[in-house]
Image (cartoon, rainbow, N blue to C red):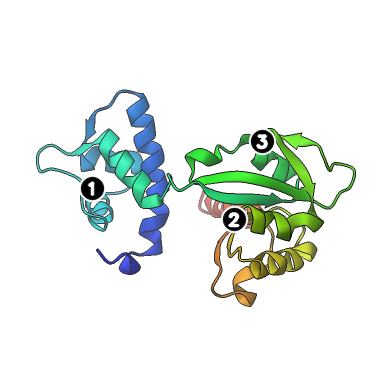
């Protein structure tokens, strides 16, 4: 299996498969056909089979898919058992919400540190993790073998933070800023989350619906 040839669109559908299969498992569904899974995914049975065949198939003719086995296989493909060590930088509203409510250990990560430059909140805790001073970021990352960083800082601070992280070996980023990391660090692995872009896309869709009435 040559995973380099698997398209990003297929990879981005895997978390949706995992989420829906988890819900089916919680509802005691033991097996499911590609057609039924396609209905849940809002796609076609052919697309489901093509997606899963990229990784080996996992189904049986006339039987369909074992929900629990398929969910576990997708978890392995996504690497959800890795528990990559990560730090979060910026404990404002977004950062605090992420640190407090994301179930990182179920999603392949272990949040081991939270950092901020606001002296007034240093020492406070979010989910038993103490907010550390940003000036200690490099030494902490090196001492704790940190592999990923979640960026929740202003764009004006992002370039400096990313440079410091990159120079101490952290090259994987969940980026909530508008700083274009790949432009300066093309070998970095980045997932960008631009909430304003998503909201503008929703606005466009609503505008189109209004015009087509």
Q: Earlier in the sequence, mark 1 or mark 2?
A: 1
x and y percentages locating residue 131 in the rendered image: 77, 43
Task: Kindly tell me whether residue 196 is visible in this rendering.
Answer: no
- Give the distance between the C-alpha atoms of the residues marked 3 and 2, in whole angstroms: 22 Å
Residue under label 2, please give it: 145
Q: CA distance from mark 1 to mark 3?
A: 38 Å
Residue underneath mark 3:
100
Q: Nearer the viewer, residue 162 or 18?
A: 162
Marks 1, 3: nearer the viewer: 3
Q: Which residue is mark 1?
A: 45
Point out residue 138 in the picture as x, y percentages from the top left corner: 72, 60
Q: Is residue 145 left or right of residue 162?
A: left
Kindly indicate whether the residue at mark 2 contacts the one at mark 1 (C-beta within 8 angstroms): no
Which image quadrant for residue 66? top left
Task: Describe the element under mark 3 as helix, strand or loop.
Answer: helix
User: Are there few (<14), some (14-19), or many (20+) residues within 10 Å of tag 3?
Assistant: some
Where does the N terminus fall, quadrant-wise?
Answer: bottom left
How far from the left and from the top, in percent, is residue 57?
20, 51
Badge 2: how crowded within 10 Å, few (<14), some, or many (20+)?
some
Badge 1: few (under 14), some or many (20 or more) residues near its Cα, within 10 Å? some
N-terminal-most mark, 1 or 3: 1
Q: Residue at x 73, y 68 (%)?
A: 159
Picture layout, residue 110 above or below residue 55: above
């Amino acid at each position: 299996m040559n995973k380099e040839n698997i398209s990003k669109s297929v990879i981005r559908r895997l978390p949706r498969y995992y989420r829906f299969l988890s819900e089916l498992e919680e509802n005691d569904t033991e097996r499911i056909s590609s057609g039924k899974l396609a209905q849940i995914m809002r796609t076609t049975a052919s697309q489901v089979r093509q997606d899963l065949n990229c990784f080996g198939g996992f189904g049986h003719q006339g039987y369909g898919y074992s929900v629990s086995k398929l969910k576990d296989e997708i978890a392995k493909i996504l690497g959800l058992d890795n528990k990559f060590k990560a730090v979060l930088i910026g404990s404002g509203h977004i950062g605090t919400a992420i640190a407090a409510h994301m179930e990182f250990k179920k999603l392949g990560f272990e949040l081991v540190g939270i950092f901020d430059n606001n002296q007034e909140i240093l020492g406070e805790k979010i989910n038993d993790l103490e907010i550390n001073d940003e000036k200690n970021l490099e030494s902490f990352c090196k001492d704790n073998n940190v592999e990923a960083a979640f960026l929740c800082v202003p764009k004006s601070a992002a370039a400096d933070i990313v440079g410091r992280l990159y120079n101490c070996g952290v090259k994987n980023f969940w980026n909530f800023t508008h700083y274009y990391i790949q432009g300066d660090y093309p070998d970095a692995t980045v997932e960008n989350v631009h909430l304003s872009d998503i909201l503008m896309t929703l606005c466009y869709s609503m505008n189109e619906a209004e015009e087509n009435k």
